[in-house]
Amino acid sequence: IIVRMKRYLEDYIIKDLEKKMVFLAGPRQVGKTTIARHILDTFNCKNYLNWDDDNHKKIILKREWLKNEKLVVFDELHKFHRWKNWLKGVYDTEGNKPSVLVTGSARLDIFRKHGDSMMGRYYHYRLHPISVKELSHSVASPFEALNSIYNFGGFPEPLMSGSEIESKRWRKDKMDRILRDDVVTLESIRNISALELLVFLLKERVGSTLSIRSLAEDLHVSPHTIESWIDILERMYVVFKVRPYSKSLSRAIKKEYKIYFFDIAEIDDPGIRFENLIACHLLKYAHFKEDTEGDRYELNFIRDKEQREIDFVLIKNRLPILLVEAKLSQEEFSKNLIYYKDKYFSTIKAVQVTKKNIKDKESSHGILLQNATDLLMELV
């Protein structure tokens, strides 16, 4: 499908490298190394160093990269247990010469929660899988792009293969490497088989509020252990949480959250896979706007104690800006969406999105019934 796709973050990263270090995080095999190599080519540089390569590791520790080049890339540097302090030392003694790009398949913004010793020294980006808007530049139409991503997910290799068998083989290998390489390297987990089973159980619960207690009973571990394992899977960009929105909703649930997968092709159920696809696109948009413009975004869902639910509400600077209900093929307007639109969100854009290739129409309540390509082409 794709020969050479310029990813949506490349120009932003190149611009920011002139000012500070840039951290680029995202799921394993989402295209971080490819972006890094394209940017190196743009700078006409060869300074690519991967912590997983023993020779590269020696060069990193001795600081023997080519200092006369404009850019150095450190890939998977987060596996070096002292990487934060080491990098701070490099930056403080050498400044931003050459420019520094750090990529990794685990979260690199962990400083934000613990006080950031590197504050002001870096910009942070999160790279997501290929979206309908990105892919539509490489295939004939947005609708074909939507079908390709729905069938194979948005990760470059299976998407380019266009083969269900190759996709399954890639998916199994990727998950094995995350669980048996990345997790073992970065986390103090020894019960990998139980974590693997948790991933399987989470796939069956996508789009539903999680019962941590039920998962704990199924796996014969404590609820605290389940929570910590889900946090690890989130740090590794396997899954992400969507939490409930409760502000101004008197009867909203406030604690339970949902789980979605970055790789939508992990999900078998057609309707849930479509919902997961919409979740991924909305989160990608939220992260993009945060990382490039600095506003605060959240992706939430709404459910009250009467079980009235809306799949997604996009929040900007603590204010709702978009309601989205994902329905694989249903064209009848959702009663729950009508209820919330009328009662709480009369001025907020509300969309019921479907995978069917239909013409957009609007209800008397101001809700837009929209085919998925139209909504997703407005994102990133």
Image: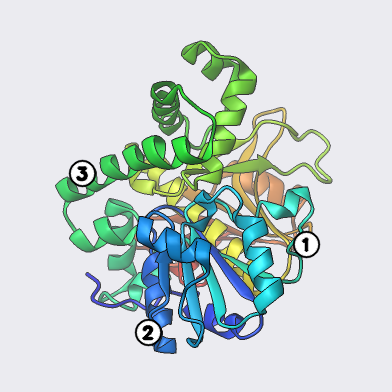
- Judge from the rendering whether residue 32 lies leftward or rightward of residue 351; answer left or right: left
- Judging depth in this view, the residue of 47 and 142 nearest the camera is 47
Label 2 to label 1, Cα distance in Å? 37 Å
Circle 1 sits on which residue? Answer: 317
Circle 3 sits on which residue? Answer: 169
- Judging depth in this view, the residue of 263 and 252 nearest the camera is 263
Q: Amino acid at mark 3?
A: Arg
Q: Earlier in the sequence, mark 3 or mark 2?
A: 2
| Rendering quarter of residue 196 | top left
- SS under mark 1: loop
Label 1 to label 3, Cα distance in Å? 41 Å
Is the residue under label 1 in contact with that under label 2 (CB below 8 Å)? no
Residue 150: image x %, image y %?
A: 33, 54
Rendered residue at 60%/15% (across/down): 222
Residue 265 in sight here: yes
Name the disc covering residue 41, or none: 2
Q: Amino acid at mark 2?
A: Asp
Rendered residue at 51%/37% (across/down): 207
Quarter placement of the N terminus: bottom left
